Amino acid sequence: MQLTEVQEIIDCLPKGQTPFWYFRDRYAFLLLGMLGDEIGKRQVKRSTFSQLLDKAVVKSVFAEHRGRAVPRDAFEYRVAASPESYSLTLDTWGSNKDWWMQTTRRGYNLVLQLNFPPEHDQAYRQLVDPEGEMPFVCFDHPVIEKRRSTLAWSRFDVDLGNGEALIEEIQTDWLRFAKEFRQQAERARGRFGRWGFMVHKEAMIEYFDEEMTKHLHWDEAMLAASVWFLRRELGIRTIFYHTPESGAAIKRTGYRQPPRSIYSRLPRRFCFRQTDRRPAFMSKKIRTNCSKKAVARAKFQVLEFEGPAGTGS
């Protein structure tokens, strides 16, 4: 994408932070809510989302309605005990020159950021980082640098003309670094640290065990927010997702690969299917440091919707 395209999308959407509450398995409710105003079991069986009928949480909703069609709101606004009150913000990422940006085609991505609830930020500042040094942040990545703390983000290449989007990546630095500190705390005596940052052993253990364990399903929440945003806010009909192989070959991610599960088991849970198709924009000239042979061999995953997004179908 060109920077102007990304900025036009951001300018057309509400400014500030969008609330996004999440609990385990809510993605199943969000996906089913996109099937229409009334959702029946037979309809789900014939749809892309048929595998979701095997989930206990979905069975319970249909059981409550005793064979009748389920209103969309009964899925989309389903509430569990103590959901996490995240917020979503938008940003840009990329360059027309630098190859290391790990985008499929040279240019820019739209970034969706999943930010921690305020309760987390308060506990984090009290227990770990009262001086605001932010040891779990890599500022070379697309995160919020002020106000709220970014748990994770996803990057998209969006083709509004064809109603398509490619999820380039979903990633977290915060949880990864916090896990490493938590492991180090087990071996520490008193205060410890690295990168010039120091924290007390007991404070780090309390922070991780009491706060960060609430967000261990960050990947599920991030992908749910991504699909919801692309479908509901942008009206995207076809969402592509990298496989581990296509991401490594096309984006040239180098020797340090992301966890395979993020590009295999996770999208399968969301009903993505492997496909020989490629995003339409890949038929045009893409980034010059990617070989045509790598593009020809690439396999993607895809999730497709029918009808206008506003109807939920």
Image (cartoon, helix red, strand yellow):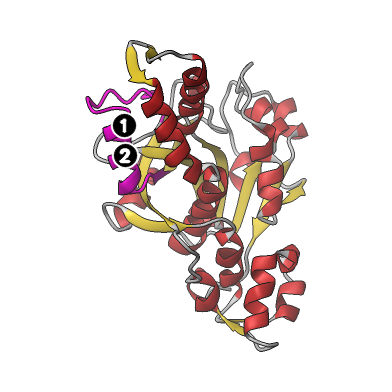
In magenta segment, residue 83: no
Specify the amino acid type for callout 1. Answer: Leu
Task: Quickly name the residue at label 2.
Answer: 123
Task: Quickly name the residue at label 1.
Answer: 127
Q: Nearer the viewer, residue 205 or 176?
A: 205
Q: Quadrant of the C terminus?
A: bottom right
User: Looking at the rendered structure, which numbered label has been put on residue 7?
Assistant: none
Real-space Cα separation, disc 1 to disc 2, in angstroms: 6 Å
Q: Residue at x 46, y 22 (%)?
A: 181
Please identify the residue farthest to the left as the structure is shown. Answer: 131
Q: Residues within 10 Å of mark 1 (few under 14, many from 20)?
A: some
Name the secondary structure under disc 1: helix
| Residues under numbered marks 1 and 2 in contact, where contact means CB atoms less than 8 Å apart | yes
Horizontal and vertical percent position of residue 48: 72, 64
Q: Nearer the viewer, residue 140 or 221?
A: 221
Horizontal and vertical percent position of residue 144: 32, 36
Q: Nearer the viewer, residue 189 or 192?
A: 189
State left or right for residue 103 relative to residue 47.
Answer: left
Q: Residue at x 52, y 44 (%)?
A: 218
Q: Is residue 152 above or below residue 59?
A: above
Q: Residue at x 45, y 34 (%)?
A: 208
In magenta segment, residue 136: yes
Name the secondary structure under disc 2: helix
> Do we see residue 145 in this rendering?
no
Horizontal and vertical percent position of residue 44: 71, 74
Q: Residues within 10 Å of mark 2 (few under 14, many from 20)?
A: some
Residues in magenta?
A: 113-141
Residue 146, quarter of picture: top left
Q: How many marks?
A: 2
Residue 227, quarter of picture: bottom right
